[in-house]
Amino acid sequence: MIERRVTALPGDRVVARVRGVVLVIDAAALDAPAAVPALLGALASAPPGTDWVDVLATNAAPGLSFAAVEVLGNDLRAALGGNGRATVALFAGAGEAAPEHVLTTSPDGAFLERVASLAPANVVTVTVGPPRPPAIACRPASLALYDGAAPAAGAVLWTPDRIAPRATGPQSGPKSEPFPVVRAIDPVPSLPPDAPQMPSHAAGSVVPPQPPTGASPALPGVLPATDGDERSFEPTDMDLAAASGAERALVSGPLVSGRRCAFGHLNAPNAAFCTRCGALVNQKAPTETGPRPPLGTLIADDGSAYVLDGDVVIGRDPAPFLDRRGGRSADGASRATAITLADPTGSLSRAHLELRLQGWVILAVDVGSSNGTWVRPPGVPAPFPLAPGQPVALAVGSEIHIGGRVLVLQANEAG
């Protein structure tokens, strides 16, 4: 039997893997509505032998858009509910730009179930919004999802040793109605007009390329740079002595205030899910202070990965820039690291971009590059330019374009 790997696409929706079922829910992972953990809990606690499709059909809240898949041998079973943007797509191979088949949620909210056959090289994507080319997630360094929930834009099911070569001929669009109908369940009744509405994610509008204006645009996934409520400072010997031995071995960042998940990982105070293991974070639990874990991982377009546990300066030769600051961060409070990238286009500056870790926030700062820095937040169709010297907070799933290189900010896996 061919075993398919499940990796996550960068983004801020809810993606989960529960008892072999891969589920993508069109709801924000941060401060997710109660319907999300309720649905995941129902799927996880269903008695053995219970059909997972029936569990979703019975327990999904009205208005909650989702798509779920399970691979059994050479068959793909898919279920979709709600009238949102959830999509299941079937690609001929990892290098294809367009899918062969696409299945989307019904406009009237009907619950759909379909079954399709899979070839060994086929790649399946489960996403919120239009299908994305899967190549970015079909790499060894991509964020693997083994169990639990995580913030992402979707999931990709692929087989590492069966990746098909990139197609060189013309790409055709998706075919209509590729999956034979298994059954369709009556539409979920709509909520009354005065009922509380589920939070929805508004897709960003296209931002035309413009010269820097001195202030960064306010777009979904990009937050204004603020100091925040969390304190950030270098830990003293007494503070570190109070931390657990395991935590000291894993992290050595500045002390921050946060809440722990069920497995003891420290998270931002407002996090609904653990960014390391995907477990729920109890928002009613008291906050506590501990060493800050790495805030993310930068995945470069060549598959190399860089863990963000401190400030970094990125460019084709950033060391002299850091040497002029004594190797310190911009505020002088901690050490900074140089990340050197090769760029065949020659458009990457020696010191191009600085990422500053402030509390629980990652700030991107163009340090005066010749060709600018462009950021595409998750859910936004087009990147926008950073104003030189203007810090902008990055969301997980953001793409960073510097010179001829592209970096993606991903959450960390639990080690």
Image (cartoon, helix red, strand yellow):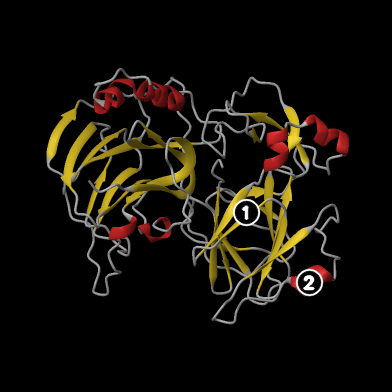
Q: Which mark is residue 307?
A: 1
Q: Residue at x 87, y 39 (%)?
A: 236
Q: Residue at x 54, y 44 (%)?
A: 413
Identify the residue shown where x is 73% and y is 56%. Answer: 311
Determine whether the residue tagged by mark 1 lies in a helix, strand or loop.
Answer: strand
Asked where in the image residue 165 lies, by quadrant, the reply is bottom left
- Measure how far apart labels 1 and 2 are at the Cα level: 21 Å
Q: Amino acid at mark 2?
A: Phe
Viewer-closest of 38 and 339: 339
Q: Is residue 392 above or below residue 184?
A: below
Say left or right for 86 vs 37.
Answer: left
Which quadrant would the C terminus be assigned to in this image? Answer: top right
**How many labels were placed on the picture?**
2
Instruction: Tell me the number on the disc at residue 321.
Output: 2
| Mark nearer the N terminus (1 vs 2) | 1
| Residue 38 location (% of width, % of height) | 43, 22
